Amino acid sequence: MAKQQQVIQAIRGMHDILPEQSPRWHWLEQHARQVLSAYGYQEIRLPILEKTELFKRSIGEVTDIVEKEMYTFDDRNGDSLTLRPEGTAGCLRACLEHGLLHNQAHRLWYYGAMFRHERPQKGRYRQFYQLGVETYGMAGPDVDAEMIQLTDRLWRKLGIREKVVLQLNSLGTCEERAVYRQRLVDYFKQHIELLDDDSKRRLHTNPLRILDSKNPDMQSMLQSAPVLLKHLGEESLRHFDDLKAMLDALGIDYELNTRLVRGLDYYGKTVFEWVTDDLGAQGTICAGGRYDGLIEQLGGRANHAIGFAMGMERILALIEQLPELSVPQSVDVYMIRVGEAAEKIGLLLGERIRDELEGVKLQVNCGGGSFKSQFKKADKSGAELAIIIGEDEALSGEVALKNLRVEQAQVNLNHDALLETLKHWAESR
Ligand code: ATP
Ligand code: MG
């Protein structure tokens, strides 16, 4: 007898999405696509692998992602490649490569798996899904407002608008940040004894990130730190004020978070996050900002860009907390067939139903079984209706139709009448 082999498991932090979970994913993805198309955004599909250099140059050498989270390896030619940890760099690379940024404006979105070698925990995985949105060629702040507006619409569609809060900040221009950075470093140096090791390390590499620290012992010192908003010039302030006025006009509330800096190097001016209290420490479901400077950094001509990405697992986790969830089932109608004649009739009837009722999800029982076992499968499928064909029905040319979810007498119908009934049922859903 062959030795029983051990089952190989998935990589830690990388999860399967099982069939019973996929209807929720589809539901979320469909809503997101609908909202994006309502604003005229177009999809761009990008490779999962890029040259390591791309991420180093765009995200920044001293960010968490590049320092310690990337899946980087040499391929068979000895080229250093990296599994994308985010989509902005690849999206911009593609647009530059294909000349999409010359005197053009673009509104784009992409969707897919991202990879970061982080410590796996609730809401933090090593493979996770992001829906990213990027626009190019628009100086804003009107398009900044549009991005926030479309996310606000999506949250309302998903039923989670009450659970999330918009946090807003402006990082100003590169020059304004440089002046501020020096002020901030001086301030931290005066309080060096209060900095933890992580922050001491960041003091010379990425001091703005220290503002982001969650360390409770540092909070009161951080509260009194110099505020970036106060170092912004006239143009940056006007951009920010105009954006806030547009959000006010749209009735979208926001919280000013002067310590919101974002993890990546390439942001400037508008930055925002949608956060919730209902997911523990991993409370940011969507984050983004303006990154005009990145285009030149990647070899393009000076231009404008703003984008954001949302974490799909975190959004789903929020949705799953809702008291009522109207996610469609994978199967609407289940056909039970007992006996050889019934199986033959069912085979053809199934095709007729699919011909005449597009959009109805019909599962036909395969593999035989008694009425009892087929009813069990019908129930488990989540179907609302069962079409039953036994030997009697096969002889009489009828079927029985039963509602599996509400107590109701089953009815016998000929095939034409069944089709009529199903059409009415489908229309009334
Ligand atoms: P965090 O502060 O949670 O680490 P981040 O600033 O690293 O987030 P971004 O790079 O801005 O995140 O990614 C945008 C969104 O993608 C996040 O707001 C979050 O919803 C999601 N996300 C980021 N990293 C992960 C991860 N490891 N697992 C699951 N979702 C993630
Ligand atoms: Mg992170």
Image (cartoon, rainbow, N blue to C red):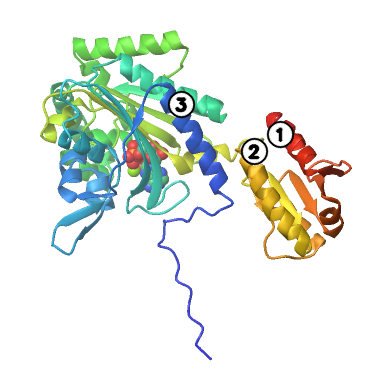
Nearest to viewer (mark 1 / mark 3)? 1
First in sequence, mark 1 or 3: give its number: 3
Residue located beneath label 1 in the image: 423
Q: Please report the residue visible at 12 percent of the width from the left and 24 percent of the height from the top.
A: 302
Q: Secondary structure at mark 2?
A: helix
177 lies left or right of 114: left
Q: CA distance from mark 1 to mark 3?
A: 29 Å
Front residue of 429 and 380: 429
Task: Give above or below for 89 relative to 267.
Answer: below
Percent from the top left, x then y, of residue 124?
42, 48
Q: Badge 1 local density, few (<14 within 10 Å), some, or many (20+)?
A: some
Q: Quadrant of the C terminus?
A: top right
Q: Please report the residue visible at 18 percent of the width from the left and 41 percent of the height from the top.
A: 60
Q: Please report the residue visible at 15 percent of the width from the left and 47 percent of the height from the top.
A: 53
Q: Is mark 1 within 8 Å of ligand 1?
A: no
- Quadrant location of ligand 2? top left
Residue located beneath label 3 in the image: 35
Percent from the top left, x then y, of residue 118?
35, 52
